[in-house]
Amino acid sequence: MSHFIDRFRKIKAMNEWLKSVRNAVKLKEWWAVLRVKLLGHYRYYGLNGNFVGMGRYYLRVLALVYKWINRRSQKRSYTRKGFAQYLGYYPIPKPRIYRNLYTLSPAK
């Protein structure tokens, strides 16, 4: 249960951050910070057995990014297809296992 609560807190914090930067900073500037935030999250939580949870986090963050990008002005910035194309040009890191919990060695 604590994993669920922790993931909920992390998603809520990401939502607040995205809301705060959406108009304050240009997209390409906060996009680089988003990449670093996601990599940090994956490196901390990237233990074997947690890939499903990290995948859920990734999908929720994508939904939040799409939501806040489209709330930067009164007209919609991206369709789903346009957002997918943007992700093709400027990808964000996908979840990955960084540590083997049983041996505490780096995952391959």
Image (cartoon, rainbow, N blue to C red):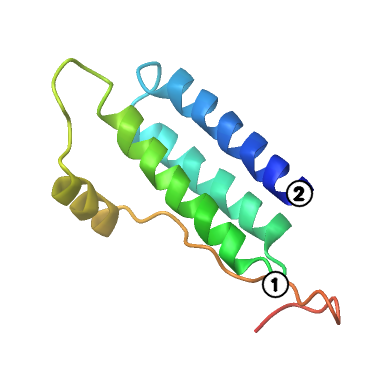
Look at the image and tell me in which quarter the C terminus lies: bottom right
The residue mark sitting in front, 1 or 2, is 2
Marker count (numbered) = 2
Numbered disc 2: secondary structure: loop
Question: Where is residue 57 shown, x and y percent of the image?
Answer: 54, 51
Residue placed furthest toward the right: 103
- Using the rendered view, name the quadrant where residue 92 is placed: bottom left
- Amino acid type shown at disc 2: Met
Lower position in the chain sequence, tag 1 or tag 2: 2
Question: Where is residue 61 shown, x and y percent of the image?
Answer: 46, 44
Which residue appears at 64% of the width and 51% of the height? Answer: 40
Residue 103 against residue 51 in the figure, above or below: below
The answer to whether residue 25 is left or right of residue 71 is right
Which residue appears at 19% of the width and 54% of the height? Answer: 85
| Neighbours of disc 1 within 10 Å: few (<14), some (14-19), many (20+) | few
Question: Where is residue 71 shown, x and y percent of the image?
Answer: 28, 22
Residue 18 against residue 62 in the figure, above or below: above
Q: Which mark is residue 25?
A: none
- Amino acid type shown at disc 1: Gly
Question: Where is residue 62 shown, x and y percent of the image?
Answer: 39, 46
**Residue located beneath label 2 in the image:** 1
Residue 25 against residue 93 in the figure, above or below: above
The answer to whether residue 59 is left or right of residue 105 is left
Circle 1/circle 2 CB separation < 8 Å:
no
Q: Which mark is residue 49?
A: 1
Numbered disc 1: secondary structure: loop
Q: Nearer the viewer, residue 1 or 16?
A: 1
Which residue appears at 70% of the width and 58% of the height? Answer: 45
Q: How far apart are marks 1 and 2 (CA)?
A: 15 Å
